[in-house]
Image (cartoon, coloured by chain):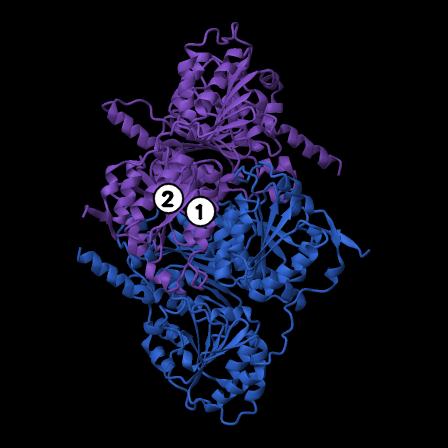
Chain colours: A purple, B blue
Amino acid sequence: MPPTVKLAEYLFTRLHQLGIQSIHGVPGDFNLELLDFVEPSLRWIGSCNELNAGYAANGYSRINGLGALITTFGVGELSAVNAIAGAFAERAPIIHIVGTPDRAVQDNRTQIHHTFNDGNFRRFALIHAQITVAQANLIDPRTSPAQIDAVLEQCLIHHRPVYIEVPVDMVTAPVSAARLASPITIPEPIPSRHRPEALALVLQRIKASQRPMIFVDGETNGLGLRKELHELLEKTHWPTWTSPFGKGLVDETLPNFHGVYMGKEKMHQKSFIDACDLILVFGPHFSTTNSFQKTAVPNPAASISFAHTAIHIGDRKFEDVLPKQFLVDILQALDEIPNVTKYEPYPELETPQGLVRSTCLTPGDGPLTQKEFYLRLSPFVRPGDIVLGETGTAGYGTREFALPRDTWYMGPVTWLSIGQMLPAAQGAALAQSEREAKSSKAEGGSKTKPGRTILLIGDGSLQMTVQELSTIIRENLNVVVFVLNNNGYTIERCIHGLNQKYNDVAAWRYLEAPNFFGAKESAQSSTFTVQNWADLSRVMADKNLADGEGLRMVEVFLDQDDAPAGLLRLLALQVEAQKSK
Amino acid sequence: MPPTVKLAEYLFTRLHQLGIQSIHGVPGDFNLELLDFVEPSLRWIGSCNELNAGYAANGYSRINGLGALITTFGVGELSAVNAIAGAFAERAPIIHIVGTPDRAVQDNRTQIHHTFNDGNFRRFALIHAQITVAQANLIDPRTSPAQIDAVLEQCLIHHRPVYIEVPVDMVTAPVSAARLASPITIPEPIPSRHRPEALALVLQRIKASQRPMIFVDGETNGLGLRKELHELLEKTHWPTWTSPFGKGLVDETLPNFHGVYMGKEKMHQKSFIDACDLILVFGPHFSTTNSFQKTAVPNPAASISFAHTAIHIGDRKFEDVLPKQFLVDILQALDEIPNVTKYEPYPELETPQGLVRSTCLTPGDGPLTQKEFYLRLSPFVRPGDIVLGETGTAGYGTREFALPRDTWYMGPVTWLSIGQMLPAAQGAALAQSEREAKSSKAEGGSKTKPGRTILLIGDGSLQMTVQELSTIIRENLNVVVFVLNNNGYTIERCIHGLNQKYNDVAAWRYLEAPNFFGAKESAQSSTFTVQNWADLSRVMADKNLADGEGLRMVEVFLDQDDAPAGLLRLLALQVEAQKSK
């Protein structure tokens, strides 16, 4: 007989092995026994509610590479559905663990609480089957370890959420510990018979190309090739853009980086890109919102796409040619190709740094505008920071940030669930602090300035999930929140209902949040107000904001009918419609 | 051609006809056009998030008889899933209207936002099919009116949520107005061939009974027979109990009303009830939590149950014998039965009023206890009030309230989703204010003291959905919130993990809520603190609390390891387990 461990120990050991240090969630009577085993493998972070826990796990996973949450059967797991669905849509790997009733209770169809009182215990798993990439119901100690391993592997491979049910009476069931000796990894690729042909085609295209470029989209994050991608950018010096989803995945200080490709929003980008004859596309995710209504989709005929588990060349798809290994092959081959296009002289193309610099050269004048706000705020970001731009005007505006090296960015992509970014900021900041503790330990405790998590969020979005500010306070996370107070859902006003009252929200006293949510008296001075450009300069230079501890909040007053450049045209249409009434 | 109306007008006119005056929800880009048509038929109440909107619609429906909410495709509707599921479990009739993308966008499988970017638009409807009793996707103007009517009828009949999808481009589609002339009603019963036999059996049992009683459970609310039930209680004077779910459905001031039947928790009740030979059971809903682990299920052999669309006599089920009509038959027959048991003298049985009176005779002494807190607070409730006891200690405790006439009660039943009762209080208070405006109009404007909505909620639950306090403030609803601050999830401590930190919550400054959430300066004095019995007496007598306007909050400090009588035994087990460690 091999040695055994308790099932909960097996599960949490696996999560720890995969690099998870903390797990979010909410206690409920069907997960309490499970929670007893979270420590010592992991740290428990109690969220205020399950939707927020799901969002937090999402933010954590983006920084840490993998995240997890624990909820309780029915009421708990169903509250998290929207967060899990968003993780599916945008490929965030999250393990959703649900504490379920005793097997006997389920088998007997007992009319227990957290059910529809009809003996049916499978409805909530059916719901999760719609929004997760793999599921396991751990009802047999003989198979549970293999089931856990199988769903974790799916989570890693697909970079999407998975669902694990743990009945209360299974928590302490002994299971074989044998598998724990072999870590779970993404399986090695099986050499594809299509690879030689695909490689030959790509090299031929590279040799022939007069005007090559690189386009990085957000699913790149799950391809595990960021190091190789960086090498490609440095080696080729080819002009590079990202999508909104891809922002932050490449070093934005490289001279050949030119920001987010905004399609018809920025015609000078578009005219260069439309004339390219070779576009290496990484991690494509062409939803309408991530591709500026499809106007920022690079020409498919010119594209070679590194997708999830295949390479697309024009309209041909080479299955099971894995992007990372394929890129390694290309990098090796590049050295041996003579006369790869080098762009001498380098074309005149806007860079984020250049745009920020030119804006900041003159002091701000007149009232605050969304158009300039983000460009002027951009220099506040420093290496090591995480920036989150909530769906809404903040999400549009932060796309123009010029990010320093070693920063992360999260903005609206496809799911666009407002309220998500506040709990996500909490989760991200937690992962960031764990990373820093680890690297400071590795470097023998040498202390550099800690990275901050910087959230930009509108008032309407903040109201959705506001209570998670208290988790930021309780865990003393290094978070700066800019609340963009423009009196309601301005992004909706841009779309429809400019002056309709359904786009209003209640007027809160936002800067009272630290006080209400229990910050120490001494920490309550960490709030700031920005009503004009001079305020912004002053606040950005304030040491208490830049280098303070825990939660800091800045309330920025913006006009209700103002929007960043990308939204202004929509807004203008609404203003016109309003006038013609 | 019959006259036409726009589809949105048809839908909202139907809701208005059914007595809905207000609709909760959150704007999103796929429902904005729909929201343009909410007025003038209905009033729009913007909630802070969709889960809260669902809970609010639930609270509204309990008082108004029917409720509705509007969300947006994907992100919006999925956030409301837990609230809709709870409405299914506990039979609250709610119409969930979802604004979905244009039909062309769906048909073309466009990779639009709020999807998984894969062209599949049906996942979220599949999820809702698990938690609603009927669904309609309005994609054809010819059939939309009949589809709407059919799901509304199902909602009324089953007293459970339904789901309606409205694509953006269908909002203004012309549809036939013909059906609007006939109101939607619950269909008249078709005389069942089983009815005569069932009636004969029941009357025979009534004649033979030496010891009859009445038991009222919560599904009674959907049976439409509260007037007839009241007549039965008054006519027979038979001893009557409710379940927790049934509390508030009968006049608790009747001398033959004896409170909530708590099974093994109150053996003096149980011994009387176990000896009864006839138990008329209304609206049975015997989940473990609503029946004190099945110990409060009346003896099935002695029971005649008035269930949803059938009468159960012993182990026989008479299908399609509708409870309301059947009760009318029985009431008529009762007059003609000689010697129906009258209980002379009436047995010695505890009444809620008696219990409250005897407790309040002596002044409170020693520290606050959960055991006495609710009994001493009970006299605060007056006719016209609504009482909500959130899942947790508050839900257990408020079961002992002695409710005056014309009050409503909502407490934990089966779904037990913590956080629900705060938004539900907002929805209930809104329905209450609409009721009062209507009846005051009917009575020519004569002014009686307005009913209040009184919420008792623990700190952990409050944190889940706290932002809806701002909706109460904005709508100036007459709500008194008692926040039971006992430093975390005490109900979970009773079950497992007495001193585990996962049962802690962050310490907030709860009484700062009105200030944070934007109450007028003048309203911010409406907060109170209770730390001992003298405080409680003082606060209960305070005019500003009892007769104030808008939101009032009372923070009550209770011991972390204290619980109402019904939970104390569980708690004791945990304390013992802790000691033996």
Mark 2: amino acid: Leu
Residue B209 occupies quadrant: bottom left
Mark 1: amino acid: Ala
Q: Nearer the viewer, residue B110 or A409?
A: B110
Number of numbered discs overlaid on the protein picture: 2
Residue A19, given in percent of the width and then of the height, sits at 31, 34
Residue B435, given in percent of the width and then of the height, sits at 60, 63
- Rounded to the nearest whole Å, what is the CA distance between mark 1 and mark 2? 9 Å
Alpha-carbon neighbours of circle 2 within 10 Å: few (<14), some, or many (≥20)? many
**Viewer can see residue A509:** no
The residue that disc 1 covers is: A80
Residue A36, given in percent of the width and then of the height, sits at 27, 49
Residue A389 falls left or right of residue A21? right
The circle drawn on residue A69 is 2
Label 1 SS: loop
Residue closest to the far bottom:
B338
Q: Quadrant of the C terminus of chain A?
A: top right
